Every structure is written in structure tokens, then in C-alpha cells.
Image (cartoon, rainbow, N blue to C red):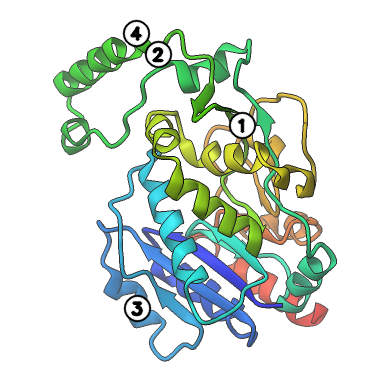
Amino acid sequence: MNIAFLNLCHCDPDVVARVTKKLTAKENFYMFIHVDQKSDQAEFESRLEGCERVFFTQKRYDVSWGSFSAIRATLELMKEAVSSDIAFDRYVLLQNLDYPLKSNEQIEAYFTGYSDKEFIRACKIGQSKDRHFQGKYKLYHDYEDKFYRSDKSAPKKLIHGIKKIVRSIPRLTFDGVIRQDGEEYPLYYGAAQWALTDDCVRYILDFAGSHPGFNAEMEHIQFPDEEYFHTIVHNSDFKYRCIKYDEPEQRWLVNWRNIHYFEYPAAITVFEAKDFDKLIQKEELFCRKVRTGVSDELMDLIDKACENKS
């Protein structure tokens, strides 16, 4: 089974290099990396010099937290992998600070056992009565606003806030269902990390390239990486291949984990050595987050455990 790991990166090149070397030690595992345009790609490349089965995207995007730019970067990773000379069976989306909890052999065996399954859980939030979900699409969100990003001083925050209110007025009647060419696409919500089959990824790329109106609407949804791919998949026949589908509406991303274990009390937890006993017992294939200087001992412990399991 050939697996393409798609990694959205912007920081901590040491963790990225460690994860990449660990995964690509297996001859049929490949890593595709998108480095945020604001970051120095050379810092990542230098740590992976000489490594096989590692590819950096030629096209790079300036990725803003919570914005549609993350979708553009992810689609670029998907295109790079699909257009390569390798026939991939599985594509796994990673986000910079993820770390494998299982050995490469366990990861391959897991996906082999679920070879026709899509790991992208989601619930429908279009036409939701929950104001929390309504706020994701009835309000106008623009995390790429360069005016605001360049200087978050009080005056600019105020102007940005006023602009958001004014632009939200015409959206108040939007019910969370995107309508295009006679089709309806109610929005779906789930965790950003996923693992998809080759034909599902190709379907998404075809859909993204042929539905400009859908993309334009998604640009101003709150945190589109939690909705874009989920909405495409769960409005298609691929939803029946998802590990779960037609699940009831439920808040908070921790309820929508796929193959990543993470904790989100106020912000996403950065795991340390003290978390090892808990993490190594999890069924998930990856944990999120780890950081150099904080999680080094934890990563060593996980690596040792993975070697023993192999």
C-alpha cells in the first residue's frame, strides 16, 4: 500500500524532519510538504537533505490561521501527490506538529484493513438551529484581511470589527446550504485532519476545480478547513464509505477525531513525557501536538515503544 502523507507546515522544522524521517523509512510511505510562504523553506529542506520519498510543493501560499488559504495549500498538496508517478492508495493530512503513535507497520496494517474507508467524520450544520454553528456561516469571516493582519492595534481591530458587521448583514438570511447549478450542498463540520482514498481525493480535486461558486462561498466561512472537505465528501456517495456518516450534530472538534488524538480544553494541548502512558494506549495513529524542547522525551518514548511493537 502506497501512502502519501500531506503535511501543512509553518514552524518547528525539527519536528517536521523527525516525523518525515520516521514515516519515510518505509519504502512505500511518501511525504509531501507545503511550507507557508511566510516561513523559510530552506530551514525545512536542509534538515531533510538526502532523504528519499520527500517532496516540497513548488507552489506555496501565505497561509493565515482560520482562513481559506489553508484549503488552497491542502489542494496544492493533493495535486502534487496525485500528479506524481506514484499510484497512491491513501492520502493522510498532517498539520505540522502531529506525531505518529504507531509504527509504520501498524499504520500500513490499519489502512490495509480499512482499504475502502474514508476517515473524515462530520455532522451537518447547514440549517442548524444552534447559534454556535450558525455563526460559522451567517457571519462574514475574513482572516486573510491584510489590513487587519499587518497591525492588530486597537483602531484596526475596531475598523475590522465594523467591516465584519456590515458585511455580515446580507449573510443573515444564509441558511448554511450552498446552492449551485441546481444542486444543494448543506455545510458539514468536523476535525481538519483526515485520511482519504485515491478515488475520493480525485473526486475532491475535480469538484474543487469545477465549482467556483462553492469555493467563493467557502472563503468566508469560519475555519473552512473544518468544513470544506467534509461538505464535499458528505454531500456525495463517498459519505457511505466514511467510517461513520449521518451522525447527529455535536459541538467541539474533540468529538470528531478521525485518526488523530488531541485534547482541546482551551487551546490544543502540547503533549509532554508525562502523557506517554495515556497516549501509547490510544487507538488513534497520531497525536497532536508536539513541540521541540517540550515533547522531545515523549517522542523518544513513543519511538522506542513503536520499535518494540514492530
- Return the residue at label 1: 188
How far apart, in angstroms, are the residues tagged by discs 2 and 4?
Answer: 5 Å
Query: Type of residue at label 2?
Result: Arg
The answer to which quarter of the image holds residue 199 is: bottom right
Query: Type of residue at label 4?
Result: Ile
How far apart, in angstroms, are the residues tagged by discs 3 and 2?
Answer: 43 Å
How far apart, in angstroms, are the residues tagged by discs 4 and 3?
Answer: 46 Å
Q: Quadrant of the C terminus?
A: bottom right
Closer to the eye: label 1 or 3: 1
- Return the residue at label 2: 171
- Return the residue at label 3: 45
How far apart, in angstroms, are the residues tagged by discs 4 and 1?
Answer: 23 Å
In this view of the protein, can residue 160 be seen by the observer? yes
Callout 2: helix, strand or loop?
helix
How far apart, in angstroms, are the residues tagged by discs 1 and 2?
Answer: 18 Å
Q: Position of residue 119 (x, y in %)?
A: 71, 52
Nearest the viewer among 147 and 233 is 233
- Return the residue at label 4: 169
In this view of the protein, can residue 296 be seen by the observer? no
Instruction: Give the left or right position of residue 36, taking residue 222 as reference.
Output: left
Query: Type of residue at label 1?
Result: Tyr
Instruction: Give the left or right position of residue 152, taking residue 1 as reference.
Output: left
Query: Type of residue at label 3?
Result: Glu
Callout 4: helix, strand or loop?
helix
Looking at the image, do the residues carrying marks 2 and 4 touch, with CB atoms under 8 Å apart? yes
Q: Position of residue 248 (x, y in %)?
A: 77, 25
Residue pictured at 47% horizontal, 72% vertical:
83
Q: Is residue 275 above or below residue 90?
A: above
Mark 3 or mark 2: which comes first in sequence?
A: 3
